[in-house]
Image (spheres, rainbow, N blue to C red):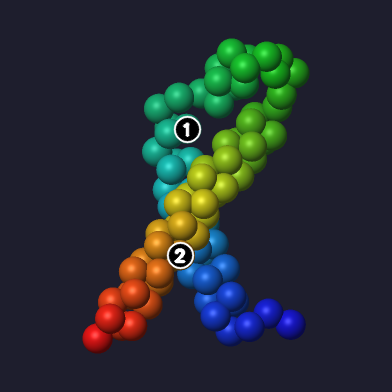
Amino acid sequence: MLALDKKLLIIGSLWPSFWMATALSGIIFSAIDPLIIASQMGFNHVSYLSAYSIGFFFFWLVCAWSGFFSIIFSRSVTKKNVSKK
């Protein structure tokens, strides 16, 4: 069983990153056709659904990674400041 602190870290990074990935997918894919990006990367036989899905999960991964490290770094700074007092 995960400790409460780890659960909060996971939820605190995945949930906001999900919403950011949703917004990024809407903004980016309204301006750029995902099939053009996929064909430039060498994936010529990709459907629209798979291109949108891959893009969404890529955005989600990047936002979750950023959120995870933001939480980790802010906690380490807070712990150092508390221990100095």
Q: Foreground: 65 or 29?
A: 65
Can residue 49 be seen by looking at this rendering?
yes
Task: Examine the image and state in which quarter residue 79 appears.
Answer: bottom left
Residue 69 position, x and y percent, is: 46, 57
Determine which of the numbered discs, if any, sits on residue 29 in the image: 1
Q: Residue at x 52, y 71 (%)?
A: 9
Mark 2 and mark 1: Cα distance apart in space: 31 Å
Residue 57 placement, left or right of 79: right
Does 58 appear above or below 15?
Answer: above
Q: Earlier in the sequence, mark 2 or mark 1?
A: 1
Q: Going by the picture, which residue comes out furthest to the left? A: 85
User: Is the residue under label 1 in contact with that under label 2 (CB below 8 Å)?
Assistant: no
Q: Neighbour class for label 2 at 10 Å: few (<14), some, many (≥20)?
A: few
Q: Foreground: 39 or 85?
A: 85
Does 67 appear above or below 33?
Answer: below
Residue 10 position, x and y percent, is: 57, 68
Q: Foreground: 1 or 16?
A: 1
Q: Residue at x 69, y 34 (%)?
A: 50
**Viewport quadrant of the C terminus:** bottom left
Can residue 22 be seen by looking at this rendering?
no
Q: Secondary structure at mark 1?
A: helix
Task: Examine the image and state in which quarter residue 52 appears.
Answer: top right
Q: Foreground: 61 or 1?
A: 1
Residue that label 2 marks: 72
Does 20 appear above or below 25?
Answer: below
Say how many tags the image has: 2
Residue 37 position, x and y percent, is: 55, 20
Residue 63 placement, left or right of 54: left
Q: Residue at x 51, y 23 (%)?
A: 33
